Image (cartoon, helix red, strand yellow):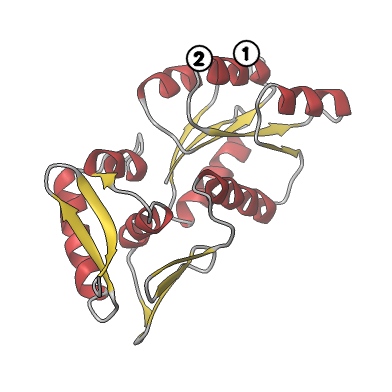
């Protein structure tokens, strides 16, 4: 799950980046609008967390650019602007949500999880398929035999598969979702992680199916 954080306050930016990385998100942090637009032109993100008051752009202009280009990304606005008209304007321009500074980091995380669920049509932090369940808030994978411990990368990849449980996800999309400016994930690393996940869920009725040349999807062993 790849996020773009656009925030010029260094302390807040560093804190948010560490927060999301602790939750096993791939997060890219930029400090101005020019860098944000460059990142959006070359990379694919699920969520953009966008400060409205940037040194070179008004955040609303970046939001308008995102919507004009019809980028499929959820946008959360961070704003110290307290007026109702600014918040309404942001929502009218296509923002999916907003938080007013100062905010609690727990609420920021919860709202980002909500946006991701909304993108994928999920209503709960519990993601299920067959007889396995993932709690994306508590970072737990449940199978009939009990809980399974996952590494950060295994958790991130399994979360992607469960969020996209009704469709096939390509290796390239998995690379995009798990990579960041700081760490680019290889196709080989994806294949190795898939191999480990298959062993760990072998006691369930869920399989990770390979579709040659296309990617992966969850399937029911019983069918």
Work out whether mark 2 precedes mark 1 in sequence or the reverse, and give the earlier one. 2
Q: Are marks 2 and 1 in contact (CB under 8 Å)?
A: yes
Q: Would you place residue 135 above or below residue 50 in this image?
A: below
Please state the horizontal and vertical placement of residue 105, each as a whole percent of the image. Answer: 66, 51
**Labelled disc at residue 57:** 1
Question: Residue 218 location, x and y as percent?
Answer: 29, 60
Q: Secondary structure at mark 2?
A: helix
Left or right, residue 125 beside residue 103:
left
Q: Is residue 181 above or below residue 203?
A: above
Q: Is residue 83 visible?
A: no
13 with respect to 89 (left or right): left
Graded by Cα atoms within 10 Å as few (under 14), some (14 to 19) or many (20 or more), the crowding at tag 2 reads some
x and y percent of residue 109 in the render? 60, 52
* Residue 41 appearing in the image: yes
Residue 44 versus residue 180: which sits nearer the camera? 44
Q: From the image, which quarter does the C terminus lie in? A: bottom left
39 vs 123: above or below: above
> Which residue was labeled with disc 2?
34
State the residue at coordinates (44%, 34%): 45
């Amino acid at each position: 799950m790849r996020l773009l954080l656009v925030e010029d306050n260094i302390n807040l930016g560093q804190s948010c980046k560490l927060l999301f990385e602790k939750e096993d998100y791939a997060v890219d942090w930029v400090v101005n609008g020019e860098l944000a637009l460059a990142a959006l032109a070359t990379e694919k993100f699920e969520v953009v967390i966008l400060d409205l008051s940037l040194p070179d752009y008004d955040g609303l202009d970046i939001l308008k650019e995102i919507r004009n280009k019809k980028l499929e990304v959820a946008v959360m606005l961070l704003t110290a602007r307290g007026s109702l008209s600014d918040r309404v304007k942001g929502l009218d321009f296509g923002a999916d949500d907003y938080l007013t500074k100062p905010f609690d980091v727990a609420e920021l995380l919860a709202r980002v999880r909500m946006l991701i669920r909304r993108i994928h049509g999920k209503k709960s932090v519990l993601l299920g398929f067959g007889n396995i369940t993932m709690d994306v808030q508590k970072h737990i994978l449940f199978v009939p035999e009990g809980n399974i411990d996952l590494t950060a990368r295994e958790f991130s990849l399994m979360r992607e598969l469960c969020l996209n449980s009704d469709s096939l996800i390509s290796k390239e999309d998995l690379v995009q979702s798990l990579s960041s400016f700081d760490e680019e994930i290889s196709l080989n690393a994806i294949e190795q992680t898939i191999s480990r996940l298959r062993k760990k869920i072998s006691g369930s009725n869920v399989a990770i199916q390979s579709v040659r040349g296309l990617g992966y999807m969850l399937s029911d062993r019983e069918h």
